[in-house]
Image (cartoon, rainbow, N blue to C red):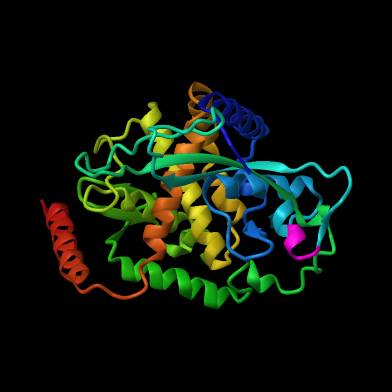
Amino acid sequence: MSGITREIEHKYREEITREIIEALRKGTAPWQQNWSNCIPVNAVTGNPIRGVNACILSMESLTRGDGNDCRWATRKQAESKKWSIKPGAKPVKIILYKYTTPPKNGGFKSKRIIFVENENSDNNSKKKNGLLRLFYEVYHASQINGIPELQDKAKIKRSSNLNANNEFIRNIIYNSGAVIGTDVEAYYRPKDDIIMMPSRKAFFDMEGYYATLLHEIVHWSGHESRLNRFVSWIFDRSDKEYAREELVAELASMFILSEAGLRPTEEHFNNHASYIDSWISLLKSDPNEIFEAAQKAQQASDFILAFKERDEKFEAKRAAVLAKLKNNKRS
């Protein structure tokens, strides 16, 4: 673990962005390559690795030769379990952000550590929250001697039962209260706060249907009454804002599908292949884009996965929106 300067962080982001752009140029989004097999997890705690780090380690798992084992650990963690890192093993750097408070002298003495005041801090507060950026070097399970064989993949995937996994997604969608109408294409209409979806018969299987619906549910989460992610109500498919939102939706839907143990289908990937050029253009313009998109995607994923119980206020809203939609069709 080491603190990092802004310059080092920028170079790191540039390097990661270049790798992702190279993968995109080959025709496949890197987070699609391994995301359906397993979720990157901490080998010691079993906790899932989140955000952009999950995307990075999902890509790296394939290069290690085992796309079904997504366990990672730092050297210190491995040694705490009496495991050892194989000679010559090269780690992968991930970045972790921690909030802290400034020291009494007003700043960290080490130039390797950054302190940034949180813009949302209360100006009257004696202590302001700061953001500490830290590098961690992690090793894949295949690089660790003594680590147990991967026996129970249920620790990484929620379930191998497709019916149970589909039910998990159905419950989340229903409990969200999102209003879903029918059209020949899938899209979210922010002005009316409604999701439009083709008939289920238009999809090869239910996994493809749910992958597409989750993509639209992520757009729905950006409404001003929820995560307030949209700069404008109207999206121009040629501008960066549209590419940015589509990237957030794609990442978040992958996070949710992985949590549910569902495999994104080839049909889903093919339907979103048209975004690749716009994503390349977006990432080339600023190496911060993928990191910010992953952060927003994780936020959207957490927001959507939190729908465990039914909120009755959505029933009235659903009825009102459907009534409005029905009246619009008559006029």
Q: Tell me where the magenta segment starts and ends, as one range.
A: 78-82
Viewport quadrant of the N terminus? top right
User: Who's the residue at 53% across and 67% down the image?
Assistant: 260
Q: In the rendered image, which quarter is residue 238 located in?
A: top left
Left or right of 301, for residue 88: right
| Residue 148: image location, x then y, percent | 80, 69
Given residues 278 and 205, the one toward you in this image is 278
Q: Is residue 81 magenta?
A: yes
Q: 265 above or below 236?
A: below
Given residues 74 and 204, the one toward you in this image is 74
| Residue 251: image location, x then y, percent | 50, 47
| Residue 65: image location, x then y, percent | 81, 51
Given residues 128 and 246, the one toward you in this image is 128
| Number of numbered discs | 0
Q: 249 above or below 172?
A: above
User: Who's the residue at 58% across and 67% down the image?
Assistant: 261
Residue lying furthest front: 105
Left or right of 165, for residue 176: left
Q: In the rendered image, which quarter is residue 311 located in?
A: bottom left
Left or right of 81, for residue 226: left
User: Who's the residue at 73% across and 62% down the image?
Assistant: 80
Q: Is residue 262 magenta?
A: no
Is residue 74 visible in the rendered image? The answer is no
> For the stretch drawn in magenta, what is the main secondary structure?
helix
User: Who's the residue at 23% across and 43% down the image?
Assistant: 122
| Residue 225: image location, x then y, percent | 21, 52
